[in-house]
């Protein structure tokens, strides 16, 4: 009897395991998987355009998934989103915005990095938390999904650019040459300025003396006893003599 039970259990075990597995669809050709066109053509087109920009400019894989398949018992949307990201992406940063249309469950966000460390995981978790807190402020579910996708993309792009900037600064500092040793040149500067200052002062003193002597010389006429002076018809001597010519009538 026990052998028959074990045989039946062994035959049923593969079917039970297959029923618990998740049937993953192929990854979307773009960035939005919406088989039922639940988002609408306008919103889907905007998301495709914006999310393609993140992939093109920042090498980020941000995907929006509208899940229309069943979930195995005990599987949460967060776990499903994480498994989708790990299955569909093979390198770099990724983010999955997952929602089950026409359900009472809220949209969830999962993100990760293929080549991540514990410090990177903490930064990614903080970025996702900040984007979720802003994206969930929208009123409608469709608007929330669109906002979540864009907010997550901006946060991860900022995170990646900051990491690249920090790594670039570290590399540039390592490649910089050693600064020249100017400690021995600084004491020589005052010694070189002293002779120049003394020379300028000496030239200034000589110029002042020359100007004073030039001003006090040659400012008087020498005394003379001749009646004519400097070729003038009426000249002076020690006294002034004025001669008036005769008046003609």
Image (cartoon, helix red, strand yellow):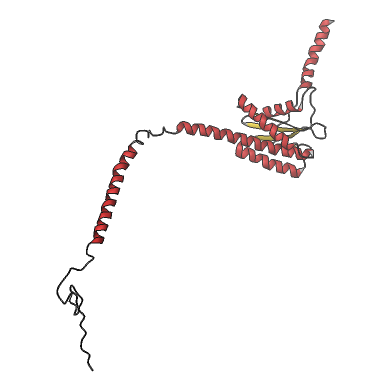
Q: Residue furthest front?
A: 239
Q: Residue furthest right?
A: 1
Question: What is the quadrant of residue 221 in the picture?
Answer: bottom left
Above or below residue 158? Residue 213 is: below
Number of marks present in the image shown: 0
Q: Position of residue 179 (x, y in %)?
A: 41, 34
Question: What is the quadrant of residue 42 in the picture?
Answer: top right
Name the residue: 77% across, 18% down. Answer: 17
Q: Residue furthest left?
A: 226
Specify whether 176 is left or right of 37: left
Specify whether 159 is left or right of 35: left
Name the residue: 81% across, 12% down. Answer: 9
Report whether residue 30 is seen.
Answer: no
Q: Position of residue 113 (x, y in %)?
A: 63, 29
Question: What is the quadrant of residue 150 in the picture?
Answer: top right
The quadrant in which the N terminus is found is top right
In this view, the residue in front, 155 or 43, is 155
Specify whether 164 is left or right of 195: right
Report whether residue 109 is seen.
Answer: yes
Q: Position of residue 206 (x, y in %)?
A: 25, 52
The quadrant in which the C terminus is found is bottom left
In this view, the residue in front, 217 or 161, is 217
Name the residue: 61% across, 37% down. Answer: 58
Name the residue: 28% across, 54% down. Answer: 208
Above or below residue 33? Residue 215 is: below
Q: Position of residue 168 (x, y in %)?
A: 52, 34
């Amino acid at each position: 009897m026990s052998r028959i039970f074990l045989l039946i259990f062994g035959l049923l075990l593969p079917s039970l395991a297959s029923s618990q597995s998740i049937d993953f669809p192929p990854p979307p050709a773009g960035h939005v998987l919406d088989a039922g066109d639940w988002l609408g053509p306008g919103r889907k087109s905007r998301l495709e355009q914006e999310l393609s920009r993140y992939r093109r400019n920042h090498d980020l894989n941000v995907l929006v998934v509208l899940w229309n398949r069943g979930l195995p018992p005990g599987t949460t949307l967060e776990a499903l989103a994480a498994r989708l990201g790990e299955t569909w992406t093979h390198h770099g940063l990724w983010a999955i915005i997952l929602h089950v249309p026409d359900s009472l469950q809220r949209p969830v966000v999962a993100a990760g990095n293929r080549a991540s460390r514990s410090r990177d995981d903490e930064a990614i978790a903080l970025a996702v938390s900040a984007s979720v807190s802003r994206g969930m402020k929208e009123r409608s579910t469709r608007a929330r999904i669109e906002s979540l996708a864009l907010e997550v993309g901006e946060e991860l792009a900022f995170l990646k650019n900051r990491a690249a900037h920090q790594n670039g600064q570290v590399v540039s500092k390592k490649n910089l040459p050693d600064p020249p040793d100017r400690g021995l040149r600084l004491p020589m500067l005052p010694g070189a300025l002293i002779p120049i200052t003394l020379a300028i002062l000496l030239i200034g003193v000589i110029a002042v003396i020359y100007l004073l002597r030039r001003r006090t010389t040659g400012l008087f006429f020498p005394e003379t006893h001749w009646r004519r002076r400097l070729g003038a018809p009426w000249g002076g001597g020690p006294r002034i003599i004025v001669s008036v010519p005769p008046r003609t009538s």
